[in-house]
Structure formats: structure tokens, C-alpha cells
Image: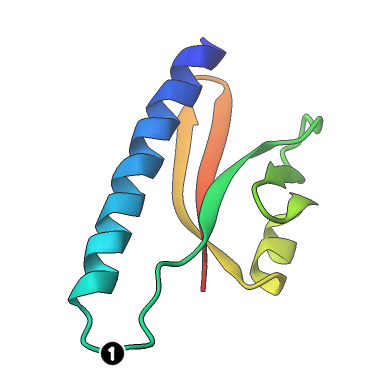
Amino acid sequence: MKKSLVFVLTLILTALVGITSTDAKSVSSPKAAVKRGGMCFPAEDPLWTTFTCDYIGKVTVKQIYENGFRVAFTMHYGSSLAFIIEEQ
């Protein structure tokens, strides 16, 4: 089940990165750039208060925002939770 969750989330992340890349190219500003982003999964915490995220490691939701990222997409699949973050 975990492999199928990772597969589904990878497809979603790939689609979102493609959309972001297309949007960044259509902006006329020369400063436009593709934002960094990644996935977060619950850390070894049964209450889901800490998460392990790409780029920023083990953090709380508050720390995600403090590190300059935002939650772009949340997915709850059975008893699993994951979300996608991107730079603000």
C-alpha cells in the first residue's frame, strides 16, 4: 500500500511541477523562476504533529511556513497522510 501511495503522490507532484513550469514560462517578467517544492510525510509521530519534508527536514506545519514554504496540496489516503510544499 505504501508503494502505491508513493506512486500516486509522485504522479501528482510531477503534474504540479509541470503546471508550475508552464506558468513560470508564461510570465513576462525576466525574474520569473520555478519554485522549489517537495513532499512531506508524517515523521514517527502518531499524532501527525511533525513531518519529514524535502529541503527542510523534520518540521511542524508552523515551521514549514517559517522556512518560507507553504502547503500546496494535501492528500489523505486510507491511514496515510502526505502533502506537497512549495516556496512562497
For the image, the number of numbered tags is: 1
At label 1, counting other C-alpha atoms closer than 10 Å, the crowd grade (few under 14, some 14-19, many 20 or more) is: few
Looking at the image, residue 81 sits to the left or right of residue 15; the answer is right
Q: Residue placed farthest to the front in the image?
A: 30
Figure coloring = rainbow
Q: Quadrant of residue 69?
A: bottom right
- Residue at left offset 64%, top offset 69%: 65
Identify the residue shown where x is 50% and y is 48%. 84
The x and y percentages for residue 3 are: 51, 14
Percent across and percent down for residue 61 are 68, 57
Residue 62 picture location, percent across and down? 71, 64
Disc 1, SS? loop
Q: Is residue 48 left or right of residue 24?
A: right
To which residue does mark 1 refer?
Answer: 29
- Which residue is most to the top? 1
Q: Nearer the viewer, residue 68 or 79?
A: 68
In this orientation, which residue lies closer to the viewer: 56 or 59? 56
Q: Quadrant of residue 34?
A: bottom left
Task: Name the residue: 40% across, 42% down.
Answer: 13
Can you say whether 24 is above or below 48 in the image? Answer: below
Three-letter code, disc 1 = Ser
- Would you identify the image quadrant in which residue 8 lies? top left
Determine whether 83 is above or below 80 in the image. below
Picture layout, residue 66 above or below residue 82: below
